[in-house]
Amino acid sequence: NYTYDERGNLSKLEATGEPPTVYTYDSEDRIISVTYGDNKTVSYEYVGNTTITHLPDNKTVVEKYNDSGDLVDKTYTDDAGNIIYKISLEYDSDDRISKSHVVLSKDNKEPDTKISTFTDKDNGTGLSNDNESMPTDETSISGSVDNAITDTTGFTNIEYQYSYTDKSQLKSESITGDRGIKDISYTYDNAGNRISETIKTGDKEEVTTFTYDESNRLIKKQSPKKTTTYSYDKNGNRISAVSDGEKFSYTYDINDNLIEIKKNDVTIFEATYDAMGERILTKELNAGGVLESKYRLNDISFEDTQVLSVYNDSSKTNFIYGNERTVEEANGEDNVLITDDRESILGKIGEGYTFSMYTPFGNNEDINFSGTEKFNDKTKTPTLGFGFDGEWQDSTGLYYLRARYYDPSDGVFLSEDSVSGDIESATGL
């Protein structure tokens, strides 16, 4: 059930068997608090171009934006004020990201470098902190975050630089820093399809090529490791992917929703949708070789439907939303979700930290490509769920984007866009 205030803002969300989630807003209709679960709260403060998010257990996120509304800095701190993750972004004259600098707390150890931890105590300025001597104006806040990382001993630093074609397609990505050096470049055909990817790591170079048919559908991918060919039905849905004796088969319902995937004639994935086309159930092959069911409780109040809960008889995971997807509740634990400028889920802050990085087309990036020690907590097993661009990734590796599925390994959708171009509407072309 949904309840709205007199200004049309969602004020309460009630789901069967769960405590209500309550939202409050300021005079500009910006969220200032989200209360959920056992009276837990996520609160927001806005000071000029800076947003401060106060999370459960005194974790904090500080975000700074430029005058165009672009994110330029985002910093996560734990309950002791230790910086866990920070990203800084620069933009070119066309408002495209030209450089990003990522700082990660190294090997899940608490570094000595801290920033003051903001709390909800009011000091009369509209922003508060637990350090009486710390100024609370926007410039001082941002400076405190920036100056906190002058000593990078306890951190891993990674820098990304980007260049673009005349059509604003990504031309290259250069990665430098504590995890080594990698250069990735792309080329495209006249229709905008990516036709090559070249990855250089030290003296090693790998080239992957992509071939398309007259309908701009990917029909062949050739990498140093293998060659994969693809076929489609009359509606433009991918129905097979074959490589080195391995075949994936895809089946769709009458509405072109993906309902089954088989690997060499063994069903590894099934999906069920409601009358509105929203996915409500998946069955995925677990470690025991059995299709395990997981149901979805969806929230249709968002512009894009979002998942509130994923559950079955043995487990349940809830997701809490404020200005973005913020907290994951699972197995009695709250995990704060770390996101980047695209709302990709980079990691979780709970009992220890875990991190993931992504290539520009959504593949999981190996941030240890230089061969150094593992960064992620070895005691934690990566879990499926929300990832690149804040979308849900299934065990098949595919991302579910409501209208269709996306394959990050190929950088293409499995199906054609359900909204066709219209010469009467420029936005539909």
Image: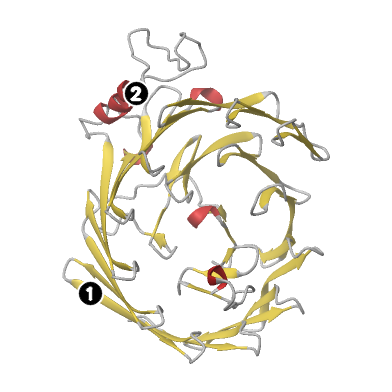
Mark 1 against mark 2, which lies toward the viewer?
A: 2
Q: Which of disc 2 and disc 1 is earlier in sequence? A: 2
Q: Along the line of sight, which residue is nearer the eye, 298 or 374?
A: 298
Q: Amino acid at mark 1?
A: Glu
Q: Secondary structure at mark 1?
A: strand
Which residue, given by chain and number where applicable, does mark 1 sit on?
Answer: 205
Q: Which of the 4 image quarters holds residue 198?
A: bottom left
Residue 302 % position (x, y): 66, 48
Q: Residue at x 34, y 23 (%)?
A: 141
Using a 10 Å C-alpha cutoff, classify the residue at mark 1 as few (fewer than 14 neighbours), some (14 to 19) or many (20 or more).
Answer: few
Which residue, given by chain and number where applicable, does mark 2 sit on?
Answer: 141
Q: Residue at x 62, y 25 (%)?
A: 41
Quadrant location, the N terminus: top right
| 413 sits left or right of 320 in the view | left
Q: Which mark is residue 191?
A: none
Q: Secondary structure at mark 2?
A: helix
| 147 sits left or right of 220 in the view | left
Q: Along the line of sight, which residue is nearer the eye, 243 or 175?
A: 175
Q: Amino acid at mark 2?
A: Ile
